[in-house]
Amino acid sequence: MSNEFRGTGNLGDNPTLKTVLVKGEDRKVAEIRVFFDEYKPDGQGGFEQSGGFWMNASVWDKRGEDVAQHLRKGARVHVAGRLAEQEWTDKESGEVRKTMQLNADDVYLSLSRLEEVKFRPKAQEAGD
């Protein structure tokens, strides 16, 4: 059973779209870095930032292409996916390192910072 994660935060950089070889097949993956922030009441009717953390996330295939096309640094997003531990060897020290990686199933743009939304035309159904 995998660990599920849901969080809201801001993109720290523009998404990076890559093509990687997975089991002999080329697949697209968008890499994003998100700061998942936390807020607490400030005692005056508002809120103040009380912490947060950075996490890298991967968004695969068509969803990854959409993320790379439509999102940019600073975008407020909701992310849902599965957490996985990644392990690698540090090239300088030779030490084994570990980090948590988020394999995102969904990335939703928060509407609170948008000025305009433009929908693409509805696809015509067969027989129209």
Image (spheres, grey):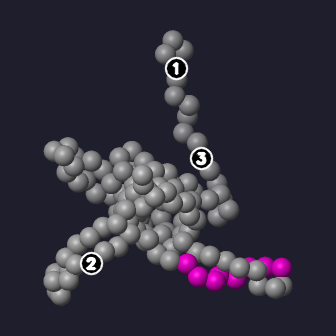
Question: Marks 1 and 3: CB-CB under 8 Å?
Answer: no
The image quadrant that residue 95 belongs to is bottom left
The residue sitting at 38% across, 69% down in the picture is 100
Q: Amino acid at mark 2?
A: Arg
Label 2 to label 1, Cα distance in Å? 51 Å
Magenta part, dominant SS: strand
Measured from the top left, where is residue 90 in percent x and y?
20, 80
Measured from the top left, where is residue 49 in percent x and y?
65, 82
The residue sitting at 51% across, 73% down in the picture is 35
Quickly name the residue at label 3. Answer: 118
Q: Secondary structure at mark 2?
A: strand
In this view, the residue farthest toward the right is 44
Rendered position, 82 above or below 120: below
Circle 2 or circle 3, nearest the eye: 2
Circle 1 or circle 3, nearest the eye: 1
Q: Tell which of 8 and 3 is nearer to you.
A: 3
Q: Tell which of 65 and 117 is nearer to you.
A: 65
Label 2 to label 3, Cα distance in Å? 44 Å
Measured from the top left, where is residue 97 in percent x and y?
27, 78
Circle 2 or circle 1, nearest the eye: 2
Which stretch did the figure color magenta? 45-52
